Image (cartoon, grey):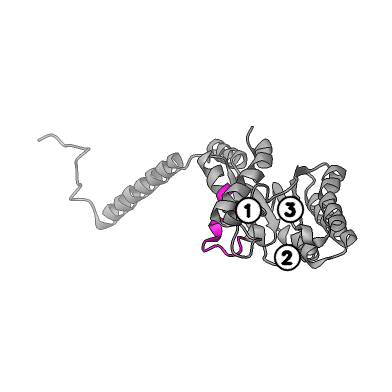
Amino acid sequence: MPENKHLDLNLTASPTSKIIKFCYFILVLFLLGCGNDKNVQKPEDTTNNTETETTASETKTKTILCFGDSITAGYGLDDTNDAFPGVLQTRIDSLDLDYVVVNSGLSGETTAGGRSRIEWVLNQDIDIFLLELGGNDGLRGVPLTETRANLQAIMDAVREKDPETTIILAGMELPPNMGQEYTAEFRAIFAELAEANNVLFIPFILKDVGGIAELNQNDGIHPTVEGHAIVANTVWEALETVIVQ
């Protein structure tokens, strides 16, 4: 039979020769394996990563922060999500707008209290800042000069942190028993500050709610769930001008 050189197991070869050939065979397999690994390892494609980062940047959720007292906090409600900030979030979600509403209301808060905690609140990025404070100042008879100075200081802090933040100032009115002169001067503070600082202005955040018994809780001050829905509509009139394009 003719000798088959390709299939010859070389049974007559010496043990040393067999070992050398076996080692050579293993070496060839190793080199082939390394070659395949090199083919598999391709340069990292950064195109998709760049596109993903760009998309994430473009769709970054923006923040609306409601900074206020018990009206914002939803005092007396079984579910604070029924307070006007929560109602605003529901409306924003229904419109598929990329905003989150943060309720930073604190019951009993005065403008002085707000001024003392504003730096802590500003540790987060804020795109729209709704300032709803002053009612407790008026009810406690705080000097109007102090209320004005505190509100101005809060807006200054927001602007210093980020000049691009949109500020909405919500005005408040006092009951007649506080005296006509005091209530008139108190009301004027908000309008004057809004004009001086060129910010969006809500003349009376409790419009169509304040003084209406069925829309307020037993204390006659804090809105019911139905009352908060109306407050949310009032705030929305100003808010939609900057978030709905």
Quarter-of-image position of residue 117: bottom right
Q: Amino acid at mark 1?
A: Ile
Q: What is the secondary structure assignment of the residue under circle 1?
A: loop
Front residue of 217 and 107: 217
In the image, the segment drawn in magenta is 74-88
Report crowding for label 3: few under 14, some 14 to 19, many 20 or more residues within 10 A (C-alpha): many
x, y percent for residue 207: 68, 47
**Residue shown at the point (75%, 59%) measured from the top left:** 135
Placement of 113 over or under 48, stated as above or below: below
Question: Which element carries disc 2, helix, strand or loop?
Answer: loop
| Image position of 83 (left or right of 24) | right
Using the image, tell me which numbered label, if any, was put on residue 109. Answer: 2
CB contact under 8 Å: marks 3 and 1: no
Q: Can residue 35 be seen from the camera position used here?
A: yes
Q: Nearer the viewer, mark 3 or mark 1?
A: 1
Residue 81 within the segment the image draws in magenta: yes
Residue 74 locus on image (x, y percent): 60, 60
> How far separated are the C-alphas under marks 2 and 1?
23 Å
Instruction: Write down the residue under mark 3.
Output: 131
Residue placed at 67% from the left, 42% from the top?
Answer: 239
- Disc 2 marks a residue whose amino acid type is Glu
Q: Rounded to the nearest whole Å, what is the CA distance between mark 3 and mark 2?
A: 12 Å
Check contact, mark 3 vs mark 2: CB within 8 A. Answer: no
Q: Label 3's element?
A: strand
The residue under label 3 is which amino acid type?
Leu
Q: Which residue is mark 1?
A: 212
- Label located before the other in sequence (3 or 1): 3
* Residue 104 visible in the displayed image: no
Q: Residues within 10 Å of mark 2 (few under 14, many from 20)?
A: some
70 above or below 226?
A: below
**Distance between mark 3 and mark 1 Cα atoms:** 24 Å
Q: Closer to the camera, 157 or 59?
A: 157
